[in-house]
Image: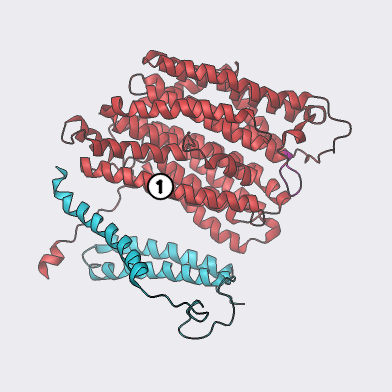
Amino acid sequence: MMALLAAVPTLTPPTGSDIVGLLPEVILGGAFVILLLLDLITPASRRTWLAAFSVVAIVAAFGTTVWGWFDAYNNPHVHGVFFGAFAYDRFGLFINGVLLTSALLVVVISPQYLNRRGLHYGEYYSLILAATTGMMLLAGAASLMVIFLSVELLSISLYILSGFSRTDERSQEAALKYLLLGGFASAFLLYGMALVYGETGHTQLEQIAIAIHSGIATVDPLLLIGVVLMLVGFAFKVSAAPFHMWTPDVYQGAPTSVTAFMSVATKVAAFAALIRVFSFAFPDLYPQWQTAVVFVCILSMVWGNLAALSQTSLKRMLAYSGIAQAGYILIGVASSPHDAGGTIGALFYLAAYSLTNLGAFAVITIMSGRGEDLDRYASIRGLAHRRPYVAAAMALFMLSLAGFPPTAGFFGKFLVFSAAIKSGLMPLALWGIATSAVSIFYYLRVVLLMYAKPDADAKSYEWSKTTVSGGAVVAFTTAGTLVFGVFVTLLYTVATAAQQGALPRL
Amino acid sequence: MLDAYIPILAFFGICVVFAAGVPLLSAWLGPRKPSPEKSMPYESGVVPQIGARQRFSVSFYVTAMLFIIFDVESIFLFPWATIVRQLKIFGFVEMVVFIATLFIGLVYVWRKGAFRWE
């Protein structure tokens, strides 16, 4: 009996600095629970209040993130909080900033869209907050356990959100498909983690890196299989080919505001974890995993861009474009251990892509008709003649996604391509440039359609009126795309600081 | 290095052979005298009233899920209860947070009408 009692480990309460390091996540997670209860006492006609509450919570979390940006810098010796399970560093906080901005913009465009589609339930906001909390935890996760838990938190919220349109078969199909394939991806991720843990004896990224670096863990097939399986899990989450099969159907079936959210936020969070694990925990295995990443990268760029050419739905086209963009960001990942510019480029690209892609989806969201999304190519024909400002913004987003200067998208591509060239991955840069040239075709097609003369005999589409909230989101994303494209150093400096502050440091 | 796992490999092999072999053996050796009664679905000896492929009320699933949630809660509670004194005040606070979270979930599903059976 005494031996049994003696085996109980002592629990250590979290210290003040642990809580401070996790403050944005704690605020958002708390707001999620409170929102669930507020929904019970809010009358159905007043659900916009719940959106307002979410906005307040997101702004509070953003405020603490900005404060943490300076606090983490002043305490450079902090090697992660909660015994190193969570990294309190500028890298994670940069990603937090991008995620919170995306969540804020999505919450602002949502109430109107949901009302129009007849989907305005309070759970929507709770789930958005829960998913954002999971993504922020993923961005800062420095332990395999935390990575897995946060992947599950964000995935489960998104499974429900993608099936949020309960009477729409497409939405149901999207949710089921995403749930089943997401389950497979989680299994791959978990199996990879188990093998890596088995070989190195640690779940914390810093300890894993040390174990591999010092030769305690031998580089044998099992460890490499573990690394590759983890890559498969992450590649699914960032929708990189050949693990992208779910993307077009889920993006098309899910309500547009949800698609807007998950197309950018999931990608940003999963890329943050991918970069942290691969370039900061497995830098010594770079020669081994580089081949796998290069393969996934080229395949995503080629497949995504070619498949996007033949689409006739804006949402599907943007889904394939998202697969291609994942390929471009992977160029940054592939060159990151050689050249710091790779990580910086990937971070810059992620921020630019979130603003641009969110803007494009915001345009589809605010135009959507009653009960249906007007996302066919035919339905945007002649948009510029009736909605000159919205069409101009959409044209700018398309140019940014294609990588034209002076937009943020151009410099994202420029940074990752130059990092690839600097680290000796010239073929990767050439593939990137060649496939971007292809992508110009389908991005410009949307622009041409919007500026074409509307067919006289075509049925006139009932585009919704642009409201203040929708207009504000489009204006914000337009401004962001332009400002980061003209004053590049603004974002570049912040991304550089994020790269330099990243944990674990060896 | 992987030599120690050879028995497990052998075990897998035996499993596959056994699982595949028994149905084959039974199909080969067993007598077959089909009759309409024999091909009816088995419902503990009672003659089935209606087809088995019909929809069930979603309430069953909700009840089952709620049961699982609180079942798991009690699984956590029992080992915690045996060592609660050694975990001191922090262990107690942790469990309060856990139960409070579950309680909020309970309030939520209650107000959403998950317990109404109609």
Residue A420, magenta (yes or no): no
Percent position of residue A471, x then y: 71, 35
Seen in the image, is A111 located left or right of residue A424? right
Q: Position of residue A303 (x, y in %)?
A: 53, 29
**Residue at left 52%, top 51%?**
A159
Would you name the residue on which mark 1 appears? Answer: A186
Q: Nearer the viewer, residue B45 or A147?
A: B45
Q: Main secondary structure of the magenta part?
A: loop
Q: Nearer the viewer, residue A37 or A286?
A: A286
Q: Quadrant of the C terminus of chain A?
A: top left
Image: B48 above or below A267? below
Residue type, mark 1 in image:
Ser
Placement of A294 over or under A418, stated as above or below: below
Q: Is residue A482 above or below residue A251?
A: above
Q: Which residues are magenta?
A: A367-373
Q: Which one is nearer the viewer's eye here, A21 or A353? A: A353
Report whether A213 appears left or right of A26: left
Q: Residue at x 59, y 20 (%)?
A: A438
**Quadrant in the rendering for residue B94:** bottom left
The chain letter corresponding to cyan is: B
In magenta stretch: residue A370: yes
Q: Secondary structure at mark 1?
A: helix
Q: Which chain is red?
A: A
Q: x, y percentage for residue A272? A: 42, 34
Q: In the image, residue B70 lies at what x, y percent? A: 41, 69
> Based on the displayed image, in which of its 4 quarters is residue A487 positioned?
top right
